[in-house]
């Protein structure tokens, strides 16, 4: 008799929460929350999970925060929908901390062409740097940041 087992890491998306004002860039956005973990599988069936960590990434500048484990568990159970600033620890500041163009509008650096202005949806918070006129998620007209 032989056993097939393995240890691997996994990631589970918990959801999107907001709208919030980003502490890293000051823009309006949402938190995308996910959990990472280690898993023991027996015959390709997950048996045991450990080392759970919760992370929140902002939609505006892609800053990454580690979320307090208790808050992460509450979010994964659906108990809490608001993330408080004291529950977040900044791991990586998005856009290198340079998310603003010379004219004060939010954008990203595009090499020699200069700053490309980002568009966002005031209804659902979706943000893109594509040249869309309308939001691909809810259909409302996008505004320029």
Image (cartoon, grey):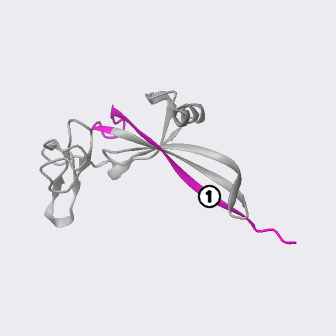
Kindly identify which residue carries mark 1. 9
In the image, what residue occupies the spot 14% across and 64% down? Answer: 113
Q: From what the image shows, is residue 128 above or below residue 8? A: above
Q: From what the image shows, is residue 99 above or below residue 28? A: below
Location of the N terminus (image quadrant): bottom right
* Residue 34 locus on image (x, y percent): 50, 46
Magenta span includes 144: no
How crowded pointer 1 is (Cα within 10 Å; few <14, some 14-19, many 20+) is rated as few
Which residue is at the front of the view, 9 or 22?
A: 9
In the image, what residue occupies the spot 55% across and 33% down? Answer: 77
In the image, what residue occupies the spot 68% across and 49% down? Answer: 49
Residue stretch in magenta: 1-29
* Residue 6 locus on image (x, y percent): 72, 64
Number of numbered discs: 1
Furthest-bottom residue in view?
A: 1
Q: Is residue 106 left or right of residue 83?
A: left
* Residue 3 locus on image (x, y percent): 81, 68
Which residue is at the front of the view, 84 or 34?
A: 34
Location of the C terminus (image quadrant): top left
Magenta span includes 11: yes
Say what secondary structure mark 1 lies in.
strand
Q: From what the image shows, is residue 121 above or below residue 71? A: below
């Amino acid at each position: 008799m032989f056993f097939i087992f393995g240890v691997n890491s996994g990631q589970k998306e918990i959801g999107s929460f907001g709208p919030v004002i980003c502490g890293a860039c000051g823009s309006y956005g949402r938190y995308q929350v996910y959990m990472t973990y280690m898993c023991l599988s027996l015959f390709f069936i997950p048996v045991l999970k450990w080392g759970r960590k919760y992370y929140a990434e902002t939609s505006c500048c892609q800053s990454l925060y580690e979320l307090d484990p208790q808050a992460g568990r509450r979010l994964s159970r659906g108990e809490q929908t608001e993330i408080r600033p004291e529950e977040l620890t900044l791991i990586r500041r998005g856009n290198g901390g340079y998310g603003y163009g010379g004219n004060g509008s939010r954008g990203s650096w595009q090499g020699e062409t200069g700053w490309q202005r980002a568009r966002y949806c005031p209804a659902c918070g979706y943000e893109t740097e594509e040249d869309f006129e309308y939001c691909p998620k809810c259909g409302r007209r996008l505004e320029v940041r």
